[in-house]
Amino acid sequence: MFCLLAASLCLLLPSCVSHKDLVSINGNESVPKDLRYPQEVSNTVLYKYQPYRIQAYDQLMIRINAFDGTTEDFLQREFAIENNNNNNIDFSPESVYFNSYIVNDSGYIYLPMLGRMDVSGHTMTSLKHHLDQAYSPYLRFASTTIKLANMRVTVLGEVNNPGVHTLYNERTTLLDAISLAGDFTDFANRGKIKLIRQTNREAHSVYLNLNKADFLTTEYYYIQPSDVIYVEPTRKKALDVSNRTLGVVISAVSLAALVINVLFK
C-alpha cells in the first residue's frame, strides 16, 4: 500500500500548475516586496483603435426612417431605431440572418430604389452618411441606421465556456472575448493564444503571449467580427489526464487487493 501511495505522489507532482502559469499580463515580471497599492507596475500605450471596415460576406441590418407625418412621429421612430427599441424588430439569430443584407464576394449589396451599392471598405458611420445622401432625392429627411449583424467571435480551447459569442460593442478587446468565454481554465497556456483573422478571401493566424503586455500594442488587441481564438492547453494537462486515468486504475487495483485480502482471511 505504501508503494502505491508513493507512486501516486510521484505522478501527481509533475502535473501541478505553477502560480506563474495562472497569471495573465506581466505574470512573469518581478514585483517589489515592499509594494504598496496602488502603485504603477507598468505603463503601456494601447494600440489605436481602427473602426471595422465592411468586407465580403458581412451581414448588415439596415433600417431607414423618413419624414412622412408629424415631427414628433419622425423623431420617435428615429430614436426607436437608433436605440434598437422597436418592438416590431426580431433580433433572434434566424431573423437577423433572413432580414439582413449579405455583402457579396464583390463587396456589393442590393437596396430598394438604389439598386447595387458598393459597401466594401466603408465603416458603419461612413456607410450611413453615404446612404442618407443616396436616399435624399427620394425621401424627406432620410435617416438610415446600420448595424453589423455578424458581430461574433469564436473562442475555443482552454476556456470555461467555449463557443460562438455575440459582441455588442464594436470596440471589443481580446480580454473581453476571453471574459465572454468564462475566463481561462487552470490548464490554459496564456503564453500561446492563437488568433485566426479573416480578411476578404484569406485568413491569417498569429500567436499572442498574454503573459506579457506586448499584445496590447498590436492590432490584435481589438477583436474583429468572425475572429477565432484558440487557447492551447499546457503540457501539464496531458499529465493530469494521464494521472486521472492512472488514479482510476490504482483505485481499482487497491479495491481488488482489499477484496482478495478479506476473502482469503
Image (tube, rainbow, N blue to C red):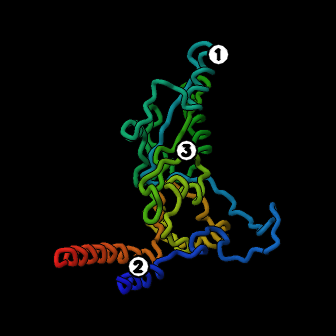
Name the residue: 43% across, 62% down. Answer: 156
Image spot of residue 224 (x, y percent): 54, 56
**Three-letter amino acid code at disc 3?**
Tyr
Residue contact between numbered discs 2 and 1, judged by CB atoms under 8 Å = no
Residue contact between numbered discs 3 and 1, judged by CB atoms under 8 Å = no
Q: How far apart are the two marked residues, 3 and 1, measured between alpha carbons?
A: 30 Å
Residue linked to disc 2? 239
The answer to whether any part of residue 235 appears in the image is no
In the figure, residue 59 lies in which quadrant?
Answer: top left
Q: How far apart are the two marked residues, 2 and 3, measured between alpha carbons?
A: 39 Å
* Mark 2 vs 1, N-terminal side: 1
Name the residue: 42% across, 39% down. Answer: 100
- Tag 3 secondary structure: loop
- Tag 1 secondary structure: helix
Image spot of residue 198 (x, y percent): 46, 62
From this viewpoint, which residue is outermost toward the left?
264
In the displayed structure image, the side of residue 95 where residue 37 appears, left or right: right
Disc nearest the viewer among 2 and 3 = 2
* Mark 3 vs 1, N-terminal side: 1
In the image, 95 versus 36, the foreground residue is: 36
Residue 217, compared with residue 107, is above or below; it is below
Residue linked to disc 1? 71
Disc nearest the viewer among 2 and 1 = 2
Name the residue: 42% across, 52% down. Answer: 57
In the figure, residue 32 lies in which quadrant?
Answer: bottom right
Identify the image quadrant of the C terminus.
Answer: bottom left
**Three-letter amino acid code at disc 1?**
Thr
- Tag 2 secondary structure: helix
In the displayed structure image, the side of residue 47 where residue 163 appears, left or right: left
Residue linked to disc 3? 168
